[in-house]
Image (cartoon, rainbow, N blue to C red):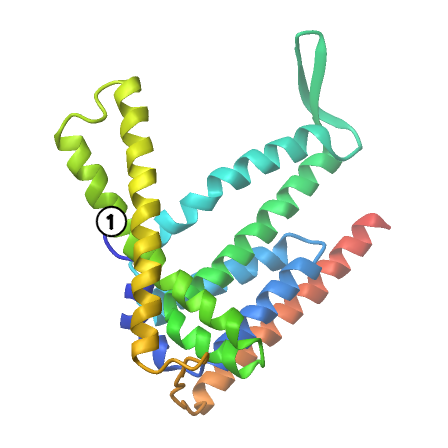
Amino acid sequence: MTKMLDDYALLSPLRYTNNWLKIGVVGFGILMGISSQSPLVPFSIAICMSLATLIFGRVPPKFYLKLLMGPAVFVVFSIIIIAFFFGSGPELFGFNVLDYHLGVNTGGLSMAFLVFSRTLGGMCCLFFLALTTPMVELFSVLKKTRLPDSFIELSMMMYRYIFVFLDVAWCIKHAQTVRLGYHDLRTSLHSMAMLCSTLFLRSWEQGEKTFVAMNARCYDGKMMIFEEKRPVNFSEVALSLGYMVAIVGVWYVSNGMLEVSLW
C-alpha cells in the first residue's frame, strides 16, 4: 500500500470532528456488537461504520477493501475451526478424513456466523477511527485520560520509529534484491539474517541519538502534547444519536426474534 493509515486520516474531512465524539461512537458500536447474540446487530454496525468511512471520511473503496481483506484471512480460518469443532444440533453436512468424521452442525454454523459478524463489526469500527483520526491526536486524548506519561511517551516513540525502520528495512531489502540476494533459499536466509542484524544495530544507534537529542533540548521526563479544541456541532451530535438509536432498535428487535425462535 502506497499510503499509510495516517495519510488518509490527515486528509479526512472527519479529522476536524471532535475526537471524543468519534471515540464514543466507536466504543458504542464495539460494545453493542459484542453484547448482541444475533449477527444482525454487528452486521448493521459494520454497514453504518463502512458507509461513514467511505462517504464522510472520503476513503477510497479499493483501499478500504484491502484493509478488510488483511484480517479476513485469519477470520476465515477461525470460523472454519468453530464451524467444524464447536456447537451442537443436527448435522448439516460432513465427511470422513482418515477414519475421522468431520461435520458441521447447526449450532457450530450459528456460532461461526456470529463470530464472523462480531469481528467484522469491530474491524469496521476500529478502521473508522484509524482512518479519520491521526495517531498524534489519539495520543492527546490518551493524555486526558490520566494514563501514565511514560506509557504515552513510549507509545509515541514506538509508533514514530515503526515507520522509520520500515523504510530502512525496505531500502536494505531493495539493495539486496538488486544484488541477487534472494535468488535461492540459502542466499535468502543469509540476506534476511543480515537485514535483521543491520536493522537491530540501526535501531540501537537511533535510540542513542534520540536520547542525546532530547537531553540537548532540556528534556525533563515529560513530552508536551498539544490538543486542538474542536467544538461539537449539532448536526454531528444528531447524526451520532440517530445511529445509536437505530442500533439499539436493531438490538432489541434481533434479541426479541431470537427469544421467539428459542421459545
Looking at the image, residue 44 sits to the left or right of residue 229; the answer is: right
Furthest toward the left, the residue is: 178
Number of marks in the rendered image:
1
Residue at 43%, 92% (x, y): give it: 231
The amino acid type found where label 1 is placed reads: Val
Q: Is residue 63 visible?
A: no
Looking at the image, residue 100 sits to the left or right of residue 197; the answer is: right
Furthest toward the right, the residue is: 263
Looking at the image, residue 83 sits to the left or right of residue 130; the answer is: right
Residue placed most toward the observer, 241 or 76: 76
Residue at 40%, 69% (x, y): give it: 135
Q: Which residue is mark 1?
A: 168
Other-residue count near label 1 (Cα within 10 Å), few / some / many at <14 / 14–19 / ≥20:
some
Residue placed most toward the observer, 217 or 240: 217
Residue at 35%, 68% (x, y): give it: 211
Q: Secondary structure at mark 1?
A: helix
